[in-house]
Image: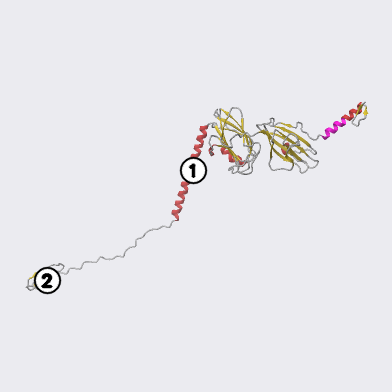
Amino acid sequence: MSMCADGRKYPLTVLQLCIANVLVTFVSSQTCSVVDPNVLPSTSEMTVFSSPGYNAGTGTYSADMDCFWLIDSGAADLKLLIFMTYDTSCPGDKIFIYDGNANTDTALANGVCGTPSAPTPYSTTQRYARVEMVSDSNVEKSGFQIDVIAAKDYSGTGCTATQSITATSSYQMLTSPNFPDKYPSNSNCRWALTSPDGYLEIDVIVSDVEDDDPTSCDYDKYLIYDGANKCDNNNIKMICSEYPKVTSYSNNSTESTVTVTLESDGSVNRRGFLLRFRSVSTATTTTPTTTTVTTAFISAISSTTARTTNGQLLEMNMELLVGVVFGSLLLISFTIITVVVVVKKVSMPLEKTITPVQPYRPRPQPPEVQPRPRRSNGSTQRPSLPNGHKTQAAGIGTTRIVSAW
């Protein structure tokens, strides 16, 4: 004889039936199909988990669901950065995220529902986060997906002055200030990573910067330069896009130094970046591990992401490119100047100075000299004047005495 749930004594067979009834009742109330609710995220890549039935956003969760997950960064000094994409039916289906391991801790997401257009970021102040989801018996949608990484602030002193960091063969981390929380407004940070072996391997794990035109990045941006100087022709990456538009990628330098900068304006701050780096002795061809979401961004940065294993070949290609560009500019300028001169000359009226012809005027002829008439005695001599008379020779200003005849 044994006692059942009602406190009365029954034969053993009846007791077995009571136990079976309790087990059935427990199983029917367990509406969450999560096998292991414990999540241990990585520090070098995003760890992804989702609600039951999510299936990359194409499936649906169950009705009357009540599930929870416990995320642990693995160390007391590591915090959690969470990006959540979700699609739930309001108001009965809700998601909660707590800054701690209990649902009595501060709520980071307090019963959110609906369908936001982009993943929503959350960051904890300590190592744990608790995620809960409940649903009613009405409309079921796809649920949620969470991308999470364990991290902390590795920015050092790079936002007060240029910080020089010597790389080693082991991976080291670098982040924007306050990571995994938001970077400050009006940031102007710079880090110089140097390899004693000759080259650097860079893996960018998280990129989350204020959205902007990726060809200009006028607001917030971080940049990676292949060299010790900030110059357009050695820019590997310029990022100003929210997560996950730019997913994780890798780059290898052709110089022994890589310069990383972060610039922000006075508004709209996000999580920034998380990258790891190490020193390598061989330059290898850069192969991004992932691609970007937007085609415009790919075309905008394709000219700056190309890197080669031969630094001299890169310099030669750059010199050739610069020569072609300047030669083209000179040719275009000469063509424009020639066209302008020709057009101006054609449009200018023709002018010619014409000297008027003077009318013909015959030159005056000297008066005809008449022959002196002969005298009756056949002589051409002028008769002499009487003695004592004077005469003045024509055309001569002298006076002479002529004897009279």
- In front of the other: 329 or 259: 259
Secondary structure found at label 1 = helix
Against 316, is 117 above or below? below
Q: Is residue 110 magenta?
A: no
In space, the residues marked 1 and 2 are separated at their CA atoms by 100 Å
Magenta stretch: give its range.
Answer: 20-29
Q: Quadrant of residue 295?
A: top right
- In front of the other: 366 or 392: 392
Q: Could you say where residue 314 lies in the image, as x and y percent from the top left?
A: 52, 34
* Amino acid type, residue under disc 1 in the picture: Ser
Compared across the picture, whether 205 is left or right of 30 comes to left
Secondary structure found at label 2 = strand
Q: Could you say where residue 153 lies in the image, as x and y percent from the top left?
A: 64, 34
Q: Quadrant of the N terminus?
A: top right
Q: Could you say where residue 241 lies in the image, as x and y percent from the top left?
A: 63, 41
Measuring 49% from the left and 37% from the top, which residue is drawn there?
A: 320
* Amino acid type, residue under disc 2 in the picture: Thr
Compared across the picture, whether 233 is left or right of 76 comes to left
Measuring 48% from the left and 42% from the top, which residue is drawn there?
A: 326
Q: Which residue is mark 1?
A: 328
- In front of the other: 83 or 101: 101
- In front of the other: 75 or 122: 75
Question: Mostly what secondary structure, the magenta segment?
Answer: helix
Q: Which mark is residue 256?
A: none
- Name the front one of labels 1 and 2: 2
Q: Which mark is residue 391?
A: 2
Q: Earlier in the sequence, mark 1 or mark 2?
A: 1
* Residue 344 can be seen in this image: yes
Q: Is residue 27 magenta?
A: yes
